Amino acid sequence: MKRLRRISSFLMAVALLVLMIPAAGAEGAAQTYETTVLFTHDLHSHFLPQQTEDGGESGGYARLKTALDRERAGHPDALVLDGGDFSIGSLIQTLYTTQAAELRTMGAMGYDAATVGNHEFDHRGVGFAQMLRAAVLSGDKVPDLLMANYRPSADDPDQLDIQRAMAAYGVKDYMLLERGGVTYGIFGLMGEDSHDCAPTSGFALGDRAEGAQRCVDALKEQGAQFIICLSHSGTNEKKKLSEDEQLAEQVEGIDLIVSGHTHTTLTQPLVVGDTYIVSSGPYCENLGSITLTWGEDGTKTLADYRLIPIDETLPEDPEIAALVEGWKSQVGSGYLARYGLTYDQVLTTSGFDLKTPESGVQEGNALGELVADAFHWAARTLAANTTDVPTVAVTADGVLRADLPAGDITTSMAFDVLSMGVGSDGTSGFPLVEVYLTGKELKAAAEVDASVTPIMPAAQLYMSGMPYSFNVNRMFFNRVMDAALEGPSYENGWTEKTSTQINDSQLYRVVTGMYSAQMLGTVKSKSLGLLSLEPKMADGSPVTDFDQCILRDKNGNEIKEWYALAAYLQSFGSEGLSAHYARTDGRKTVSHSWSPIQLLKHPNWITLVTVLVLALAVLAVVLVVRALVRRQRRRRYGGGYRRRRFGR
């Protein structure tokens, strides 16, 4: 009997143990989580849809809100994040400092957090501070702003004012966000190239890798389970230029990087170690969505990744649509009224598309030529003070921000093309300036286009009043073969008169946008000292304050880049834009010939030194070969003589 009891007790214990094993196993198993992040970057104030090549539409915040709501319906715990450059790119940006329209609209769409990009500083650090204050005073919901490695410079006289505005808004390095039972750590970074693109920000850039590692360590210490970096740095096909890939290699612990600045569209995430890098493309073209499943051990699996087009197939959210219309109304009364224009006013029509330059293509571009001609025309017809000094107008690839599609061309479309910057009057849009260069420096400007463009596509230039030719196979900084001056005629569109030679020592007037003028002085450093352009005043003295060079109308108002284009377009009236602009007109001739005559035409000292070095190298090779041949002959004949002699 006792034996039976012992067996029964043993069996019961075994049964209980068996029942407990699954429970213990479940308790010990690593928990699995799911994270969905909805993301954008480089929105550039694209509140309204833009026309696409196929006749459809792309972007618009009312449609973006619809897409966000649909995604959140399927993923209630999704985070909504932005990678910077949410401002500057449409007329509504003119409310940036007074209404903070971008941040307030993002808040209404439900964004959790964003970082800043270089264009958030187009109104300088003071304008950034004004925008932050406007957002706070509105009382509206706005996203958190995260900046871990960007601070007002100690040299900036407005440093304290900017810091107070940042504190009032609550700008911080990083944040903890609990959503769906997961604690997220999110921080923001400014990239090196992005900082270089904000020369008037008044901010100092801290080391990206050090700042990121500091944030990661602090967030993990405070309980963050999943780390997200909002980086306005970007990726590139060339690894040495791909800042966010380098960041993922240098910093441990980042689970996801939302990568902005380079306007990249990644149809699949980049994976560097344990870090996923995502980009959805610029201008509100897509809403990015990534879903990852992950465990406490850090192992991640990609469950879903999509780029959701924001196009005409999506209905507009009525609340956001009404908000955007309100912004448009304020732009009309507060900014455009002084120009006698309205937001959707038709300036003229076009029977053809005018597209922004294709990166890396050095030939002419009709849009660039149109803008340069508009500057030239405005300097002669809109400016209060005119001059008989020969004038060359210049624009650059980097400031041309939007296409002009065939059909009606409106005020807002003209603004979109040249939407960057701020003037000394504190309002949006770079003003035109006039500076003076010697004839030698004018030729050097053409050389910048010919030689610097292959390594800096944004430096590609388009000129009005100075046709030139260059050969891409010639020596760097000696590619230009010919350049001349041509005076303008405004009858029947734009035509050119007989060309005249450029006098190297004579001063010539150059009309361009403020940003491009400021960049002229950097040519020397960019060309390793081989080219030099020093902007001058009319009397030949160096420019010390570009504000003194601003072109103004008879009422003393700045002539903005965009308004020069709008007024020039308006001058064509109902007849439409001249067919002259349907294609490039040959004012910039690019040769790919290997003809020795072209390659050696008008050589400068760089080409002469290179030719001399090559000639000496060839001569040295010839002498070495001759010496080797002679030595070989001596061995052959000398050895034979000795063998015959001793053989006797």
Image (cartoon, helix red, strand yellow):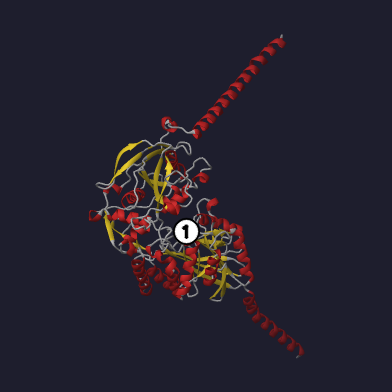
Q: Locate residue 554: give its quadrant.
A: bottom left
Residue 55 drawn above or below residue 381: below
Graded by Cα atoms within 10 Å as few (under 14), some (14 to 19) or many (20 or more), the crowding at tag 1 reads: some
Q: Where is residue 645 in the image (x, y as percent from the top left)?
A: 70, 10
Mark 1 = which residue? 266
Q: Which of 338 and 258 is in front in this view?
A: 338
Direction from residue 200 to residue 206 in the image, left or right: right
Q: Which residue is drawn at 64% across and 15% down?
A: 637
Direction from residue 617 to residue 122 in the image, left or right: left
Q: Which of 583 and 169 is in front in this view?
A: 169
Q: What element carries label 1?
A: loop
Three-letter amino acid code of the residue under disc 1? Leu
Residue 534 drawn above or below residue 203: above
Residue 193 drawn above or below residue 631: below
Q: In which quarter of the image is the C terminus?
A: top right
Would residue 591 be visible to someone looking at this image? no
Q: Where is residue 303 in the image (x, y as percent from the top left)?
A: 50, 67
Q: Position of residue 462 (x, y in %)?
A: 38, 46
In this view, the residue farthest toward the right is 2
Q: Nearer the viewer, residue 369 or 339?
A: 339
Q: Locate residue 600: give its quadrant.
A: top left
Q: Quadrant of the N terminus?
A: bottom right
Would residue 498 be visible to someone looking at this image? yes
Q: Residue at x 63, y 66 (%)?
A: 217
In this view, the residue farthest toward the top is 648
